[in-house]
Image (cartoon, grey):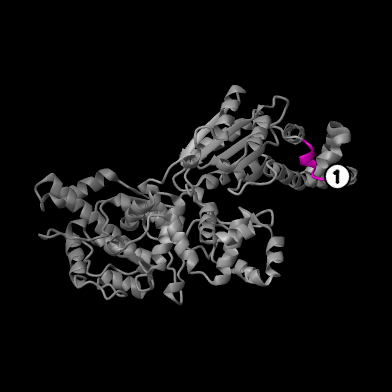
Amino acid sequence: ISSGLSLSIEEPSYMSFLFEEEGGEKDEEQLGRYLEVELDAAKAKTSVATKTDDCCGSADDREIISTDRCHFLVAKILHELFTHEAFPGDDNHDGDNEEPAYKKAKTAQLERGKNGSDGCNIHIPAIGRMQQLDIPASICRMVQNLLESPLEGGGDAYKTLGEVGEDLHLLLFDPDRFMFDHEARDTDDMQLLYRQEKLYGRDKEETLITDTFCRVTRGKSEAFFIGGFSGSGKSMLVDTLRVKVKDAGGYVIKHKFDAIPQDRPLSGVISAVNQLCLKIKDRLTSHRLTALSNKLKDEFGADIGLLARMLPNVCALSPEFSSLAGEVEDGNTSDKMNARSVSFTLLRFVRLVSSPKRPIMLFLDDLQWADDTALDVVHTFLSDTMGSCVFFVGTYRDNEVQIGHAIFDLLQKLETSNVPTTKSSLTGLDRGDLNKMVSDALGLYPRICKSLSDIVFQKTKGNPFFVLEFIQSLQSRGLLQYDSCQKRWVWNTDTIRAEEITDNVLHLLSTKLNQLPDEVQLLLKVMACFGACTNESVIGYLSESPEYAGVRNGLEGAISEGFVELNAEGSFKFVHDKVREAAYNLTPDRDKKQLH
């Protein structure tokens, strides 16, 4: 790089195992290496000062030249690492000329590139050569931005080496997204690289809910409430805990309440506990299943048949329970018992199957639509002092609950019963986290995406679900396009700002749904009237009638378009409440009455 500088380059010993196959042999197909470079800072400072003192008098000027020179040297290193060729126009020494050699080389590169580019070929010799050698566009872009100067109007020019380091880390740790080129036969087929499983900007809340669960594993039940607007990521936050609960030996059961009232108020909680039976069967050995079955018979005695009728899946724990359930009179078992009896029966079951080593996480989603009796069962579980170990997580739209709602009654009861309770509220993502989200979706360095992210933030206020829908709307309207020559997504901020784009997510979704084939629209409208989930049997029954014969094909289309998915229970559900809400709003009132 420069005479007089001392560099130590080595591969850290702790990284060596990553590049070895079984038997200790090196993996020949390994794409790259991880090296650490240590620079003698004192000599570097002296070297740079010596070469800049003669050029400019002021400290500020010397600092600008020093930064400019460093950027050029990094560009030169990257170019030579990837091309295995000398940097074009560089005589490889600084000498005592009036203008430093690095400045000459850089100026020569930019002078030849002043006429811009023809889209595919940038007229900067160093970059052009890298393109000829099919070096990834992300590397070419980095070298180009290093050669550009922010003081000379370079739009994406690096301002500091810190920015370069951040981009290099992205290339190193996620090369499929940020380093390698993404190609498609037709640019219209290019897909955005959404991280569906990633939770952005919720590190603090994720730590809080994890710490709360860890306390529960010591034997004390707790409650955790999460408020926030629809689309703020409440369910995703809870989902981050699923693997941790399973690793701790626990069980996760879930129920999502619906805006459409249910005929049986406790059916949701009963359904969640019924799920638990199958999870227990899958987890325990045959010996432990036998021991648990014996405990259930001892606890419930003659009422074991009643339990089996209430929780049909309990029969999976022991074949004997099926015959006992048959001895109970036909009819709706939970209807013959009052809510207090049902609650106590469920509690007795939970006591037996939960423990600090086998905690139960009960996740109830959309509590704003929950009924009083369901929340009373939650209080019964959590206030129990005879051995149950339950971690309750409840999410709700805090902008849709008023003073006097059952949620606040539950909070008051839990406080009175000395049940530890934590409350958290999710707001919109800040600009930095939203920019990371956009950067991941586009596979572009965050610093380049900032102009687009600022517009998205203004429109969406940082609501994660709305952010995704807004970006997709830009793509569908041609305001966000993939440029196959530049091998990146491109946009014009002035054009986007000038467009009349709604800041209402329901309007965006409604517009998108109206463009779908008739069969898909029919399916979505039908499902919206059935609630949060629709069983396969319902789809099959409706498809036999002439009026709804297209729902079967519509289901396939809705799944492929990403509006509907199959859940763990084997029924079909909307990917988000807002999709269902938009579909419901498109359904004529006469059709709503018929389907309800």
**Is residue 390 left or right of 562 when viewed as pictured?**
right
- Please tell me in which quadrant of the rendered image residue 427 appears: top left
In the picture, the quarter occupied by the C terminus is bottom right
Q: Position of residue 189 (x, y in %)?
A: 46, 72
Residue depicted at x 13% and y 45%: 59
Q: Position of residue 514 (x, y in %)?
A: 48, 67
Q: Nearer the viewer, residue 103 or 411?
A: 411
| Magenta extent | 330-337
Q: Say if 478 sits above or below 339 in the image.
A: below
The residue indicated by pointer 1 is 318
Q: Position of residue 28 (x, y in %)?
A: 53, 65
Q: Position of residue 338 (x, y in %)?
A: 75, 34
**Is residue 282 left or right of 16 when viewed as pictured?**
right
**Residue type, numbered disc 1:** Ser
Using the rendered image of the protein, determine whether residue 297 is visible from the camera's viewpoint.
no
**Is residue 193 left or right of 521 when viewed as pictured?**
left
Callout 1: SS:
loop
Which residue in the rendered view is the most extreme toward the front?
590
Using the rendered image of the protein, determine whether residue 242 is visible from the camera's viewpoint.
yes
Q: Nearer the viewer, residue 275 or 490?
A: 275
**Is residue 264 left or right of 477 when viewed as pictured?**
right
- Disc 1 residue crowd, few under 14, some 14–19, many 20+, Cα 10 Å: some
Q: Nearer the viewer, residue 179 or 259?
A: 259
Q: Say if 484 sits above or below 154 in the image.
A: below
Labels in figure, total? 1
In the picture, the quarter occupied by the N terminus is bottom left
Q: Is residue 336 magenta?
A: yes
Residue depicted at x 39% and y 52%: 460
Q: Is residue 293 magenta?
A: no
Residue depicted at x 17% and y 64%: 104
